[in-house]
Amino acid sequence: MTWLSLVITIGLALSLIGQENGPQAQINDIEQRIQKLERNQSALENDLSSESRDIERKVNRLEDDLEIAGIAVFLSGIICALWAQYTRRSAWLWFFFGLLLAPIALIALVWQNALGLQSGKLRYWTKEC
C-alpha cells in the first residue's frame, strides 16, 4: 500500500466517523430550533391575546362614549326646539339644526336669545328679572 492509499483510507474512515456523529448533532440542532420556535410562537400568541383584549376594551369604551355623545346631541336638539317654540320659531327646524350641528346651534341659540332680549322682542324667562 502506498502512502496515498493510506491517506485516502484514513480520510474515509474519519469521514465515516464524522457522519455518524454529524446526523445526531444536526438532529439535536433542529430539535433546539424547533423548541425555540415553539417558545416564540407561544410568546407571540400571548402578546396577540393581550392586544386583542386591549382593543376590545377600547372598542367598548368608544361605544360608551358614542352613546353619551348621542344623548347629548339629542338633548341639544330638544333644547333648541324648546327655545324655538318659546320664541315662535320653527321647532322642527331648530330641532334638526340642534341634532346636526349641536355646538353651532347652541351658540346661535344663545346669540339669537341675547339679540332678542336686547331689542325687547323677548322677555326674560322669569318675571323676577
Image (cartoon, rainbow, N blue to C red):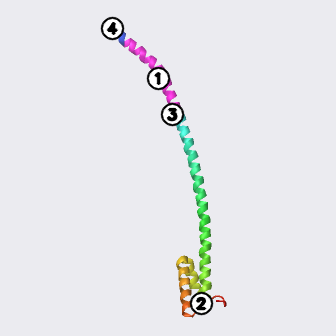
Q: Which residue is mark 3?
A: 33
Q: For the residues marked 4 and 3, what is the alpha-carbon distance in whole angstroms?
A: 43 Å
Position in image of residue 22 (x %, y %): 47, 23
Q: Amino acid at mark 3?
A: Arg
Residue 108 position (above or below residue 15) = below
Residue 87, label in figure? 2
Q: Which mark identifies residue 22? A: 1
How many angstroms separate mark 2 from mark 4 (CA)? 120 Å
* Region of the chain picked out in magenta, as a range: 8-33
Mark 2 Cα shell of 10 Å, populated few (<14), some (14-19), many (≥20): some
In front: 9, or 48? 48
Label 4 neighbour load within 10 Å: few <14, some 14-19, many 20+:
few
Label 3 crowd bin: few (<14), some (14–19), many (20+), radius 10 Å = few
Pointer 4 residue? 3
**Residue at the farthest bottom position:** 120
Secondary structure beneath label 3? helix
